[in-house]
Image (cartoon, rainbow, N blue to C red):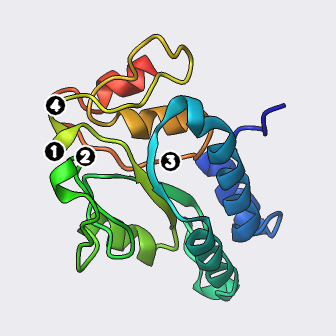
């Protein structure tokens, strides 16, 4: 039997703020969902459970007064966004193993708000073409859409409540509609 989908962002924010759960428990639930669902969906290009859980425990140690509205919310990051602590290949084999020196501004802001990046998601090469290996979580014979396919598929499969994506030429609206 599959684990339950991760709750919505609003549900998680309420549970985390009220003490109904911990960041580590939420991270473990997401990691379990990824482990079970991703072999079929193939939305993720990088997940390091040990780093995720260490980050979750660190966030659990932050005092309640210092927590923002997004504290502990798991975030997935499209592989087009730079992350200082994860590889960023921009969906391209020529950047395999590339480690940026700093986070993209949006990732840095999310971290400052207390969000927990779980890993990197599939994108088309340079957010353009060709499509990546991700499948539609509702029907593996159908496309998950364009360059934000990993982002849309991971949310639709209930692996995470929210993900970063980019809109170039239908890169968010098509995957969101398809998934």
* Quadrant of residue 26 within the rendered picture: bottom right
Q: Position of residue 57 (x, y in %)?
A: 68, 80
Numbered circle sitting on residue 162? 3
Give the mark nearest the N terminus, 2 or 3: 2
Instruction: Calculate the distance from the C-alpha at mark 4 to the C-alpha at mark 2.
Output: 9 Å
Badge 4 marks a residue whose secondary structure is loop
Q: Position of residue 45 (x, y in %)?
A: 41, 49
Label 4 environment density (alpha carbons within 10 Å; few <14, some 14–19, many ≥20): few
**Relative to the observer, which residue lies in front, 133 or 28?**
133
Give the mark nearest the N terminus, 2 or 1: 2
Image quadrant containing the N terminus: top right
Label 2 environment density (alpha carbons within 10 Å; few <14, some 14–19, many ≥20): many
Disc 4: which residue: 129
Instruction: Calculate the distance from the C-alpha at mark 3 to the C-alpha at mark 4.
Output: 24 Å
Instruction: Calculate the distance from the C-alpha at mark 2 to the C-alpha at mark 1.
Output: 6 Å
Residue 130 falls left or right of residue 76: left
Question: Is the Cβ of the residue at disc 4 closer than 8 Å to that at disc 1?
Answer: no
Numbered circle sitting on residue 126? 1
Q: Which residue is found at the position 72% from the left and 65% from the top?
A: 16
Give the mark nearest the N terminus, 3 or 4: 4
The answer to whether residue 6 is visible is no
Q: Which residue is found at the position 54% from the left and 13% from the top?
A: 139
Disc 2: which residue: 91
Label 1 environment density (alpha carbons within 10 Å; few <14, some 14–19, many ≥20): some
**Relative vertical location of residue 172 with respect to residue 80 in this rendering, above or below:** above
């Amino acid at each position: 039997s599959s684990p339950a989908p991760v709750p919505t962002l609003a549900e998680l924010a309420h549970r985390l703020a009220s003490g109904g759960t911990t960041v580590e428990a939420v991270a473990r639930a997401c990691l379990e969902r990824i482990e079970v669902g991703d072999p079929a969906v193939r939305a993720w290009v990088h997940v390091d459970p040990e780093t995720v859980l260490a980050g979750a425990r660190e966030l659990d140690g932050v005092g309640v007064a210092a927590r923002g509205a997004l504290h502990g919310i798991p975030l997935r990051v499209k592989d087009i966004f730079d992350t200082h602590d994860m590889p960023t290949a921009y969906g391209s084999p020529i950047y395999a193993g590339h480690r940026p020196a700093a986070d993209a501004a949006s990732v840095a802001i999310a971290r400052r708000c207390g969000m927990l990046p779980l890993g990197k998601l599939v994108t088309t090469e340079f957010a353009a073409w060709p499509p990546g290996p991700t499948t539609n979580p509702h029907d593996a014979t159908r496309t998950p859409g364009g360059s934000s396919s990993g982002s849309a598929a991971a949310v639709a499969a209930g692996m995470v409540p929210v993900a970063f994506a980019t809109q170039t030429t239908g890169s968010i609206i098509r995957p969101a509609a398809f998934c």
